Image: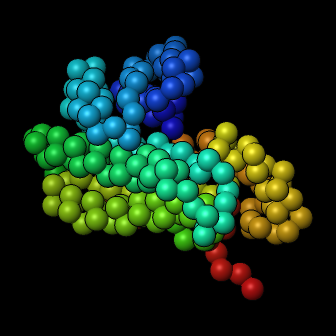
Amino acid sequence: IALALGARGWGVVVNYLASEEAAHAAVREIVESGGRAIAVQADVRNLDDHPRLLDAAVAAFGPVGMLVNNAAVPCRARVDLLDTDLEDFDRVMETNLRGPFFLSRLVARHMVEQPRPPENAPQRMTRMIINIGSISAYAATHQRAQYCLAKAGLAMMTSLFAARLARDGILVYEVRPGVIDTDMVAGSKARYEKRIHEEDLLPIARFGEPEDVARAVAMLADGALAYSTGAVIDVDGGYHLRRL
């Protein structure tokens, strides 16, 4: 997502928690391609970090035009719903829902304070918030209840912010990935390989790639859906289709 937005001329703040080397590698790649980017360490769980993250963005690039809520952690272990661990429940909910909610609130207030772009402004000047959701918003997996609950909450959060912010010219979307080939699914990759290729899990029978998600975000960033808000963009190989 960061690389795709950097290639389109956005000034990109790469927020990281602990992966400093990876964040700076992304920044270098954006800058070497002619883009603008900085890396900022901040914990989305920690609401006290949010103003510092926003301030760094404004200092580097001026008023913020887009927030992409992509921070998420998986459950530490898949356990039965009845054995859900309270500490892990709080960790997942705080990172995947509480943090994005209050960061969105902070950035939305900042956006509202800025002069609204004129009606004839280029579409890409439209301000927006993009939440990276998951098919777990509706596909129940009782061994990781907290993740499903957090993503279901993020889906409603998209609707809430979309309904509130439209009057201020701020659009809100959810990009909803399916089974994407990232570190988060590495431990379950063999199981997903079997389900995709042998059990007809997906109409488009392959893993999703990070680039698939990035293209959806870039499309929204380019203003392709400027007369839509609260929309969900499924990037899931057709998983959401009901099939007989």
- Is residue 95 found left or right of 119 in the rendered image? right
**Is 221 in front, or is 48?**
48
Q: Quadrant of the C terminus?
A: bottom right
In the displayed structure, 199 sits above or below 78; it is below
Task: Please report the residue visible at 38 percent of the width from the left and 41 percent of the height from the top.
Answer: 45
Q: Position of residue 116 (x, y in %)?
A: 13, 45
Q: In the depicted view, which residue is nearer to us: 204 or 155?
A: 155
For image coordinates 21% across by 58% down, the residue present is 165
Left or right for 235, reference 115: right
Quarter of image, res 229: bottom left
Rendered view: 104 above or below 191: above
Q: Residue at x 16, y 51 (%)?
A: 119
Total numbered labels placed on residues in the image? 0
Q: Tell me: 44 left or right of 120.
A: right
Is residue 168 visible from the viewing direction of this image? Answer: yes
Tell me if residue 211 comes above or below residue 141 in the rendering: above
Looking at the image, residue 196 lies above or below residue 120: below
Query: Left or right of 160: which side holds 210?
Result: right
In the rendering, at what x and y percent does residue 220 appear? 42, 50
Instruction: Indicate the position of residue 17 as horizontal and vertical percent values.
Output: 46, 29
Residue drawn at x 38%, y 39% is 44
From the top left corner, tell me how far across and down residue 161 is, in percent. Answer: 27, 60
In front of the other: 154 or 162: 154
In the current view of this chain or complex, which residue is farthest to the bottom?
A: 244
Residue at the right extreme of this rendering? 198
Residue 133 visible? The answer is no
Colour pattern of the rendering: rainbow
